[in-house]
Image (tube, rainbow, N blue to C red):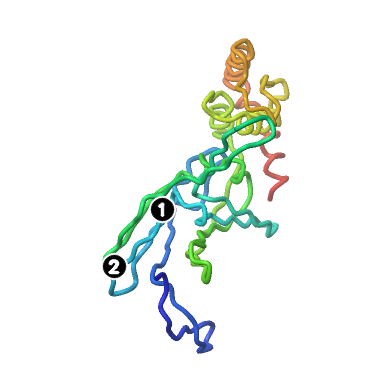
Amino acid sequence: MDRIFSILILGGFLIKGTICMKTISISIEKEDYYMGEEINLSVKYKNETKSTIKFKDPIKTWEVSLRTVNSDDNVEDVHFGKIFYTKIREDFVRATIEEADTVELDPGGEYQFTDNIAKRWPEVFIPGYFTLQVMDETNDDMTIYSNQLKIKILFSEDSPPALLNIAADTERTSFYRRWAMEWLQKIYPDFILKLPAEDEDEPPSENDENFNMQQVDHFKKWWAEKRNTKQVRVKIENINKGYF
């Protein structure tokens, strides 16, 4: 049982409704970030009833998601629970939802987790203003919403090293490495990695990866020489102008 029947006050009007047995609150360390910086989102669940409740661990549950709304009112929902894809044969891929442990909360008890959302979904947190909110849709009859938080993200001189770490990370998928490469090309167009096409599952070949590491080294040297030049500062300013 996930909910209790009650009287709910909304916007000064008294209406019959339901109040969820658990509530969600979120918090972050600050409001201003640079692109590529860690954004550690703390999510707290609380048992608001006088009985013990059980639910799936939210950080591994597909029905629990983070909603972001940018300054253009574009909405994007990303899910905490993962889906794993296994290629069975050439024309068939099996999708498996991540298994979640059971959380048990005594009356008034709290359960909290923290996730670096900028590392998990870097493509979401580009320059701009964002509103963050966590949604729990594990109950078909009611969606639980957390409080909202607002953040600002700038492309700064700290962003290229952070993006380069993603581009150079061989544990990352080609999607994220290409994404980081394309952002770095905004300030250094010669930075080109050899990565598989987006529809290919195979990692880069050994020769391609050796080439990629050379490109990473070239970028590091270029950045050490050029980061404080007027030309680079203007490029960074122009990137941010496109989002503010």
- Label 1 and label 2: CA atoms lie apart by 23 Å
Dot 1: element:
strand
Q: Is residue 230 in view?
A: no
| Left or right position of 128 against 44 | right
Residue 11: image x %, image y %?
Answer: 54, 83
Indicate the amino acid at tag 1. Answer: Ser
Q: Kindly indicate the quadrant of the structure image that contains residue 77.
A: bottom right
Q: Is residue 19 above or below residue 242?
A: below
Indicate the amino acid at tag 2. Answer: Thr
Q: Residue at x 64, y 30 (%)?
A: 89
Residue 162: image x %, image y %?
Answer: 54, 32
Circle 1/circle 2 CB separation < 8 Å = no
Q: Is residue 92 in view?
A: yes
Q: Residue at x 53, y 88 (%)?
A: 13
Give whichever of discs 1 and 2 has the lower sequence position. 1
Residue tagged by mark 1?
Answer: 42
Residue tagged by mark 2?
Answer: 52
Q: Residue at x 53, y 54 (%)?
A: 66
Q: Kindly indicate the quadrant of the structure image that contains residue 176.
A: top right
Instruction: Looking at the picture, tell me which residue is in the foreground, 143 or 240.
Output: 143
**Classed neighbour count for the residue bearing mark 2: other residues with Cα under 10 Å, few (<14), some (14–19), many (≥20):** some
| Left or right position of 61 against 224 | left
Q: Is residue 190 above or below residue 46?
A: above
Residue 222: image x %, image y %?
Answer: 62, 18
